[in-house]
């Protein structure tokens, strides 16, 4: 996936987990809230700093990661 403008990766923030714009709000936390039945508006009410576009990009990123496939490398 390219053109991630709202998802950041920094080993100094949340152990390098994908986060919303460098904040301590992880993509996993957002996806977990939506998966548990919260609406985007409810997530925004719970977390005052992320914006609607942040939530939508987090969901897009998670969907893209779910489609990734790991291919084992042959032993050397």
Image (cartoon, grey):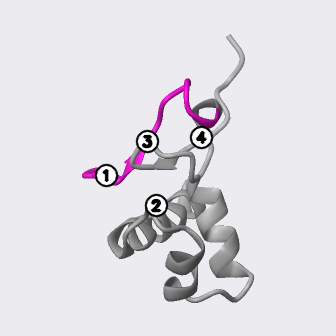
Sequence-first disc among 4 and 1: 1
Residue carrying label 1: 4
Residue 28, picture quadrant: bottom right
Q: CA distance from mark 1 to mark 3?
A: 12 Å
Residue 68 versus residue 21: which sits nearer the camera? 21
- Mark closest to the chain's N terminus, 1 or 2: 1
Q: Residues within 10 Å of mark 4 (few under 14, many from 20)?
A: some
Whether tag 1 and tag 2 are in contact, CB under 8 A, the answer is yes
Q: Mark 3 to mark 2: distance in Å? A: 15 Å
State whether residue 41 is above or below residue 10.
below
Which disc number belongs to residue 61?
2
Q: Tell whether 57 sits left or right of 59.
A: left
Please report whichever mark, 1 or 3, sits nearer to the chain's N-terminal start.
Answer: 1
Q: Nearer the viewer, residue 32 or 3?
A: 32
Where residue 53 sits: x, y (%)? 33, 71
Quarter occupied by residue 35: bottom right
- Tag nearer the camera, 3 or 2: 3
The answer to whether mark 2 and mark 4 are in CB contact below 8 A is no
Q: Magenta segment, which residues?
A: 1-14
Q: Secondary structure at mark 1?
A: loop
Q: Which residue is mark 4?
A: 17
**Seen in the image, is 54 located left or right of residue 34?**
left
């Amino acid at each position: 996936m390219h053109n991630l403008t709202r998802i950041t990766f920094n080993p100094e923030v949340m152990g390098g987990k994908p986060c919303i714009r460098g904040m301590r709000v992880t993509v996993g936390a957002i996806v977990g809230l939506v998966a548990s039945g919260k609406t985007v508006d409810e997530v925004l009410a719970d977390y005052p700093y992320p914006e609607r576009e942040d939530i939508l990009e987090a969901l897009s990123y998670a969907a893209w990661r779910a489609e990734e496939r790991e291919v084992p490398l042959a032993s050397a």
